[in-house]
Amino acid sequence: MRNGRPDSGYLYWRWKPSGCDLPKFNPRKFLKLMRNKSLAFIGDSISRNHVQSLLCILSQVERAVEVYSDKEDKSKRWLFQSHNFTLSVIWAPFLIKADIFEDNNGVSSKETHLHLDKLDLKWAEQYDSFDYAVIAGGKWFLKTAVYLENDEVAGCHYCPGLNLTELGMDFAYRKALSLALDFASKHRAVMFLRTTTPDHFENGEWFSGGTCNRTVPFGEGEVDVGELDRAMRGIELEEFDKAAAAAAVVGSGENVGLKLLDTTRLSLLRPDGHPGAYMQFQPFAKDKDAKVQNDCLHWCLPGPIDSWNDLVMEMISNGGLYR
């Protein structure tokens, strides 16, 4: 709003699931549930966006103290002192080990190298300290990447000119999720796998003039999940079901610490909830027809992703009701 967005309806819409009531997030109750516990969000900038939503809501009761930040300000940790509750966000956009040659503007000097058989140790090495974790993969897998297994090049995705076998991003995404979920099922933390987040670029992509100027949610039947997001969500559901079934066999079906946080469709309905052109300060102050880059992937706060935290709280409060 400070950047000049003129409408405010996006602040007040709230998702209501069909056939049941989803209680609104209760920050006081949540902090009581989290007393002497820790929760980590593991993933890319959408995971950071998710934790920002939670921090905003919880600040109604208690302001967190930042106790750690990495050099790039991408991984952070906060402490809610009166509840001894630790909240973290860990930058691990692929979940698996990745050698990334990219600056802060997204410009790459070399192809990313993904190790399909090794987890990103930034989160894996501290996983035993968490009581709950929300993980998510996604759009980073669309980037050009060379794939390695046993430290040997196995193929790539979108790498013309390298004379490597094209394996496709779905191959790597499946491997990454399988590895992460298998690891999580063998540890005490309850892990929520959040499904893919649809963007709402229209008339182009983020780099080619795409915009998101809608100011109201989509109605029933007005929109469907796109081909790419449908494919990614399909991989997520398949790998989740495999990991949950394997963990249930090992653990006799009791207290399997894997939960599916399926936010794709509810997020799809909210094209109005992105910063759009207002990711920048007063983008149309000098020229009302200015061509500016839009952010139609991340979310305004308050906004649609607050519902993700409604779901997280409900699943923690009444965990036995949900797989």
Image (spheres, rainbow, N blue to C red):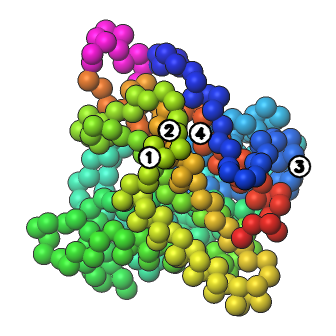
Q: Residues within 10 Å of mark 4 (few under 14, many from 20)?
A: many
Q: Secondary structure at mark 3?
A: helix
Disc number lying in front (1 or 4): 1
Q: Which residue is found at the position 77% from the left and 48% from the top?
A: 21
Q: Is residue 144 visible?
A: yes
Q: Which residue is found at the position 83% from the left and 57% from the top?
A: 317
Tell me which label, 1 or 4, sits earlier in the chain. 1
Q: Amino acid at mark 1?
A: Val
Which region of the structure is painted magenta? 280-290
Q: Decide: is 161 above or below 77.
A: below
Q: Amino acid at mark 4?
A: Pro
Residue, disc 3? 32
Task: Give yes or no for contact between labels 1 and 2 (Cβ–Cβ under 8 Å).
Answer: yes
Q: Secondary structure at mark 1?
A: loop
Q: Quadrant of residue 150?
A: bottom left
Q: Decide: is 197 above or below 8.
A: below
Residue, disc 4? 304
Residue, disc 1? 223
